[in-house]
Image: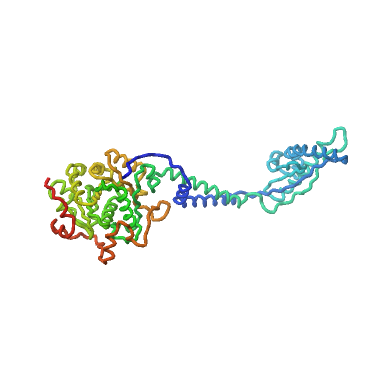
Amino acid sequence: MAAPCTQYRGTPVLDLRDNLRILRRNWILIAAMALAGILAGGLASVLTKPTYAAETQLFVAIQSSGSVQELQQGNTFTQARVQSYVKTVDSPVVLQPAIDTLGLELTAAELAGKVTASTEANTVLINISVVDNSPVQAAAIAQAVASSLVNAIDKLERPKAGGTSPVALSIIKPATAPVSPSSPNTRLNLILGLIVGLALGFASSVLRTTLDNRIRGENEVRLVTDAPLLGGIAFDQDATRKPLLTQTGPQSPRAESFRQLRTNLQFANVSGRAKSVLVTSSLPSEGKSTTATNLAIALAQAGQTVCLIDADLRRPMVSEYLGLDRSAGLTTALVGSADVNDLLQPWGEDNLFVLTSGQIPPNPSELLGSDEMKHLVSRLEQAFDTIIIDAPPLLPVTDAAVLSQHVGGVLLVVGVQRLKRHDLEKSVNALNLVGAELLGVVLNRLPVKGPDAYEYSYYSNDADTDSGAAPHSARSRTGKKTSNDVRPTTHDTSPGDLAAAGRPAGRFPRDDH
């Protein structure tokens, strides 16, 4: 049973496979952003003026030789005072003497921006770090600030009544001129640039994927309809010059795609009710004519009697692909100028008959929606196993929507990278509006490799392993040559002669209506 044209919209939830697909689709963008991040990090390192950091360390001690208990109390007292000494380092009391000693042309506030003091928990150590553009001056300032702090604390802690300070600061690690700059850290900047570039690249890829509403694969189709995906036609660069299935290698991905489409169509129409299948698309240039033609050829190669009708009365292409005369065809039969038995043209060595478009009429929609067209399709369904009808696109004109009411089912061809999601939505709505039976969707022009490749195809080493290709395989084993010639077959044969030749024309009832 074919799935109904149920339509739904939803916000896709990105899982691991979606993320991997985004990465594969946009790897060039992500790589470019990562490279740009590395270049930005390197440029920042080059343009940043190098700075040097000189450090010195002081030890705070209690000047007491009392008992052990007094020493423990003094140690606790010292640790508590160390935090205050750290806060004192960037005060003018400490910095101004250092400025005067070195003759710096800086204010205490300006020098405070270069000096950093810290202490580690539960210790009596004070670390002083000075940053400057000159390594020698950084060391000199650090040493001067440390010496100034020693003197300042001695004065601040000295009792007013006189005597010595109970606390003594000693420089245990004199400042030395650093050999290498502390900033910029080129390696860190490059790593950060790479990380930021990758993050921006992935974010840009997600945004690009979210804003891009083109149909790229099955995931995008599922956002519009839950109709079965019957096949994916692999892209072939030679398809423009050699559009037919018989013109490509039997083991090519394109040939296998049509054989798989044939098999899936049989499963979608397992009840057999849809003997006539309308092949259409949303917009022109999505490949619906080549899909209809090659599907008809594939069905005929599987042993079915197939009638291919070119019902695109605005831009007929089937006759050009097959090399047939279209001066008399569908329109000729619809206006009653000739019987369809005299208009069917056999093609190839299989049971494939083609009803070309005929002369292009001024009123295609009226002809295709007429009772004559309905009666013609009904007659053909009695004579052939399958009827494949190539119809115009759905959105530009109403021909396909009108004609879909006379057939058993519709096959919707979607050109990936060409069709947008809202156009597919309009097409599905148009088919729903007229009550058409959507058998499934065919994705055309899919890449053979990459994230959007049709991942359900199976390329056999033997092109004839398809279960539906038994008649074709039998011919190959008997050594009979399969014609790849797209030139028209001689059509001077009468319907009776066709019957004698094993063609289905003899079993096609002549219309006396």
Image point 87% across, 32% down: which residue?
Answer: 161
Report how many numbered discs are placed on residues in the image. Answer: 0
Residue located farthest toward the bottom when viewing the structure as drawn:
479
What is the x, y in percent for residue 265?
30, 50
Quadrant that contains the N terminus: top left
Query: As rendered, which of 81 and 136 lies closer to the eye?
Result: 81
Image point 27% across, 58% down: which residue?
Answer: 301
Q: Is residue 475 left or right of residue 190?
A: left
Residue 362 appears in the picture as rendered: no
Residue 153 placement: quadrant: top right
Q: Is residue 11 left or right of residue 301?
A: right
266 is higher (above) or lower (below) than 480: above
What is the x, y in percent for residue 258?
32, 55
Image point 26% across, 67% down: which residue?
Answer: 479
Residue located farthest toward the front when viewing the structure as drawn:
271
What is the x, y in percent for residue 133?
67, 48
Q: Is residue 423 left or right of residue 55?
A: left
Query: As rendered, which of 189 and 413 lies closer to the eye?
Result: 413
Query: As rendered, which of 136 and 396 lies closer to the eye?
Result: 396
Q: Is residue 390 left or right of residue 444?
A: left
What is the x, y in percent for residue 433?
28, 38
